[in-house]
Image (cartoon, rainbow, N blue to C red):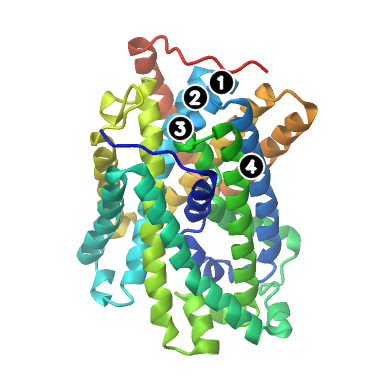
Amino acid sequence: MIETRRLGWGLAALVVAGNMIGSGLYLLPATLAPIGSSSIIGWIVCGIGALTLAWMFSGLGRFQPTADGLSDFAERGMGRFFGYQAALAYWAACVAGNVAVAVAGTGYLAFFFPALKQPVPGALANLGFIWLATLAYIVGARMAARFGALALGVGLVPIVLAVVAGVMAFDPTVFAASWSPEGQPLTATVPASLAVIFWAFLGVESAAALSRLVKDPARDVGRASVAGVVLAFIVYVAACLAVFGVIPAGELAGSTSPYADLAARVLGASLAGVVAICAIIKVAGTVAGWTMMGGETARRAAEKGYLPRWFGGDGNLPVSNPVINAVVMSILALVTVQPTLGEQFGVLVGVTSVLTLSIYAVCAVGLFRAAPSIGWKLLAVFALVFSVFAVAAAAGPYLKPTVGFFILVSLGWLWVRRRHPVVIDPPAPSL
């Protein structure tokens, strides 16, 4: 069995921030370039939404301190069927999203080893990221959390360099000229930016999902969630302003390393390699954090009878749990390198966002039912509205695969009910 030690709220907050500030941040400015610097409004909207969700998980941690992860929040709020759906959806989101992070890490590694751009060497590098994180998790959840926290610190180095460079060379004219490159109004650019931007905030639920590992869930889940979101939001907005204030949107759209390009323009080209090294370390830490998330989600699902006992039981985490997860991620990583499935991999990332946002909506209903005061109930309503709005904005071509996943999982529910008709959890504390 894997030894588990509790996390304090500070370390848990770094896990939250580390899971959000993933490899995607290094590429988002280029992705948002067609929308322009007006995407800063999208960052603010998503930041407010993420902070609302953080407070929602704070309330869930306070009023359901004995809950063990997101599936418990969903089950206590809407019943066992929704708990089952949330457990498997979140596990799938962790596994699929982690593969996306690993692939992005290989892209930065290719800065030094161009051969990794080829399918076979690139696939081997992806597997290296996945199994390195798995070994850290096997050593212990605390080791994986510390690795993720260390990687967060290293990964912030290129962002800090970019912000410093942006402050030194910020040009209001460049920022204004990039406001909307295609001349579209805010009613068109802001919704378009939300689908991309909210991917950067996935992970706000990390402390709640790891509630079994937190020392005092009633207090520390809320602290970690809010602190992690605030840290990530500050980093995101500062970095976005810096890049759009120096590099014109037209040039930014063709960049494969926006922060390296910014640092090279202002501080010198030699720093591009430093940015790439820091990005690689950060990716490894992000994969470690999401590996822990996927393992804990699968463990709880096994305890509830939703997944086989190979994933855990009776509060224990067998070595087979992270190993099976790593095998599943390895298969996905190998499948996605096939040329004909490249576009499908992009859809997989989009489905991850929609799946996670759907779980947020179910958790919001859980808070509404558990909250003892009108203030917390209103917060739950706001969180629900934002989650539904974000799903509507991000769904697009990802809606059909998501619906297909839930239909498949619903069919599996028939097997679960037959094999595990009753699961008794500790009663929630009286309010």
- Residue at left offset 54%, top offset 44%: 9
Q: Badges 2 and 1: C-beta atoms under 8 Å apart?
A: yes
- Residue at left offset 64%, top offset 86%: 169
Q: Quadrant of the C terminus?
A: top right
Mark 1: which secondary structure? Answer: helix
Residues at marks 2 and 1, CA–CA distance in whole angstroms: 8 Å
Q: Which residue is mark 4?
A: 53
For marks 2 and 3, give the one nearer the viewer: 3
Residue 212 - label: 3
Residue 76 - label: 1
Viewer-side residue, 255 vs 425:
425
Residues packed near mark 4 inside 10 Å, few (<14), some (14 to 19) or many (20 plus): many
Residue 83 - label: 2
Which label's residue is closer to the chain start, 4 or 2?
4
Residue type for callout 4 = Leu
- Residue at left offset 64%, top offset 15%: 430
- Quarter of the view holding residue 109: bottom left
For marks 3 and 1, give the one nearer the viewer: 3
Q: Is residue 384 left or right of residue 216?
A: right
Residues at marks 3 and 4, CA–CA distance in whole angstroms: 19 Å
Relative to 310, residue 110 above or below: below
